[in-house]
């Protein structure tokens, strides 16, 4: 399990218990949290264009791209995700991707950042970004810094 960025796993666990290293039913807990009251559900095209998936990825696939549902976890180059907020105000961005996809600068990191800039709801700079397998990539700001490090 990857943990990178400015938020150590123990602090992340204080905010979201299902991020603990040994949490039974982790994927189901993440799904329950993000499906209960999502702030935004999205697909991000390979070029970074944001697509509003309304309340469900499977029911709202970009037109002409239904086949990407059969290509987990790569989704034909698309990224999919959910934005949700805990009752105590902490925001979480879950991106369904391979573990290493957002851990280093590269295409997927740039793609998600371009997409997140287009989200039509408030996105906190300190929102925690994770994978659906509980890999922790840090905050949105950490992702920006990681991407910028590639260009130095």
Image: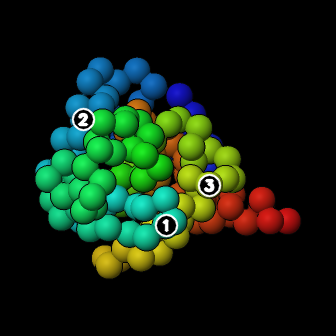
Q: Can see residue 14?
A: no
Disc 2 and disc 3: Cα gap in Å? 29 Å
Identify the residue shown where x is 19% and y is 58%: 60
| Other-residue count near label 3 (Cα within 10 Å), few / some / many at <14 / 14–19 / ≥20 | some
| Other-residue count near label 1 (Cα within 10 Å), few / some / many at <14 / 14–19 / ≥20 | many
Q: Can see residue 68?
A: yes
Q: Mark 1 or mark 2: which comes first in sequence?
A: 2
Q: Is residue 32 left or right of residue 145?
A: left
Question: Closer to the observer: label 1 or label 2?
Answer: 1
Disc 1 and disc 3: Cα gap in Å? 10 Å
Q: Which mark is residue 48?
A: 1
Disc 1 and disc 2: Cα gap in Å? 28 Å
Q: Quadrant of residue 75?
A: top left
Q: Mark 1 or mark 3: which comes first in sequence?
A: 1
Residue on which disc 3 sits: 107
Identify the residue shown where x is 30% and y is 36%: 70
Image coords of residue 100 (percent x, y): 59, 38
Identify the residue shown where x is 57% and y is 34%: 2
Above or below, comparing residue 29 to residue 81 in the picture: above
Instruction: Point out the residue furthest to the right here.
Output: 152
Q: Mark 2 or mark 3: which comes first in sequence?
A: 2
Residue on which disc 2 sits: 29
Q: Give 5 or 56, whichever is nearer the viewer.
A: 56
Question: Closer to the observer: label 2 or label 3?
Answer: 3
Q: Is residue 107 left or right of residue 90?
A: right
Quarter in which the C terminus is drawn: bottom right
Above or below, comparing residue 140 to residue 8 in the picture: below
Q: Give 86 or 3, whichever is nearer the viewer.
A: 3
SS at mark 1 in the image: loop
Identify the residue shown where x is 33% and y is 45%: 68
């Amino acid at each position: 399990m990857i943990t990178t960025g400015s938020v150590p796993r123990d602090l992340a666990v204080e905010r979201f218990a299902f991020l603990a290293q040994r949490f039974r039913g982790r994927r189901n807990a993440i799904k329950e949290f993000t499906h209960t009251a999502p702030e935004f559900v999205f697909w991000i095209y390979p070029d970074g264009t944001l697509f509003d998936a309304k309340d469900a990825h499977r029911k709202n696939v970009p037109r002409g791209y239904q086949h990407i549902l059969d290509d987990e976890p790569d989704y034909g180059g698309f990224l999919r995700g959910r934005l949700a907020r805990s009752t105590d105000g902490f925001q979480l961005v879950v991106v369904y991707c391979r573990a290493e996809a957002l851990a280093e600068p590269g295409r997927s990191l740039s793609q998600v950042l371009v997409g997140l800039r287009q989200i039509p709801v408030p996105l906190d700079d300190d929102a925690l970004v994770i994978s659906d397998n509980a890999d922790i990539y840090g905050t949105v700001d950490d992702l920006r810094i990681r991407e910028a490090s590639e260009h130095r």
